[in-house]
Image: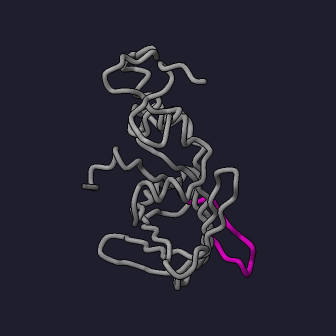
Amino acid sequence: MKDADECCGTTIFGCFPGARRKNKPSKEKVQPPEQHLKDSPGGSVQAFYRQNRGKSCRKIMRFNGYPNKVLLYPEEGWARSAVSSYWTLTPTWWNRSKCKVVEVTGTRKYTTLAKMVDTDTGNLFIVGSFNKRTDPDFKLCLTSDVSTADFNMGYSITGSLECGSTKNNSFQTTHFAVIRRRDFDINRP
């Protein structure tokens, strides 16, 4: 027979293990507010970093909201002049492995469909091509395994952009690519 203290006695169906009486004081220790922040999903930024480091890039991109803005910073060793631009990534609703890539450079926009390959180690590869004359093909390699310094700068996903030609198999790393966290991006509502 159960002890009267263990049963909540609030329903006709009997006792539920997780239920407590409202007028009885809890036997659990009350945690300090700092530990509540660590356990809650909307808690501290460092808890978010520990939970999402190395996780699926698709899940982090979905958490950030679509379209995701990819900021591109030119590599120092790249010999050509780099136009300041950014990309937006939006997965298609009809195919899980495709995404719409929009390159915005000044007032011009170039749009293409690309293939998304997600690995279980937290890496996402986006491969496609634009209809350009020079270096039409690209490989965007993203990872959620970011360093603490990059995370403190507001980046949840980092990676690199390689441009070139698949005919010649000549790709060069042209840009450093980052996606900002939702709470760090000032352009989001």
Give above or below for 169 relative to 54: below
**Residue displayed at 64% across by 72% down:** 164
**Residue displayed at 54% across by 38% down:** 51
Tell which residue pokes out farthest to the left in this image. Answer: 189
Give above or below for 173 relative to 10: below
**Residue displayed at 62% across by 44% down:** 54
Left or right position of 55 against 63: right
Can you give x and y, in whole percent of width and height, for residue 170 in the image? Answer: 71, 70
The C terminus: image quadrant? bottom left
Can you give x and y, in whole percent of width and height, for residue 162 in the image? Answer: 61, 63
Colouring scheme applied when the structure was drawn: one colour
Is residue 134 something one can see in this rendering? no
Give above or below for 33 relative to 104: above
Can you give x and y, in whole percent of width and height, for residue 75 in the image? Answer: 54, 53
* Number of numbered discs: 0
Left or right position of 84 against 17: left
Residue 69 appears in which quarter of the rendering? bottom left
Can you give x and y, in whole percent of width and height, for residue 70 in the image? Answer: 45, 59
Front residue of this view, candidates 171 and 181: 181
Front residue of this view, candidates 97 and 175: 97
Is residue 94 something one can see in this rendering? yes
Front residue of this view, candidates 76 and 176: 176
The N terminus: image quadrant? top right
Front residue of this view, candidates 168 and 27: 27
Residue 103 appears in which quarter of the rendering? bottom left
**Residue displayed at 42% across by 31% down:** 9
**Magenta-colored span:** 163-175
Is most of the magenta stretch helix, strand or loop?
strand
In magenta segment, residue 167: yes
Left or right position of 189 against 171: left
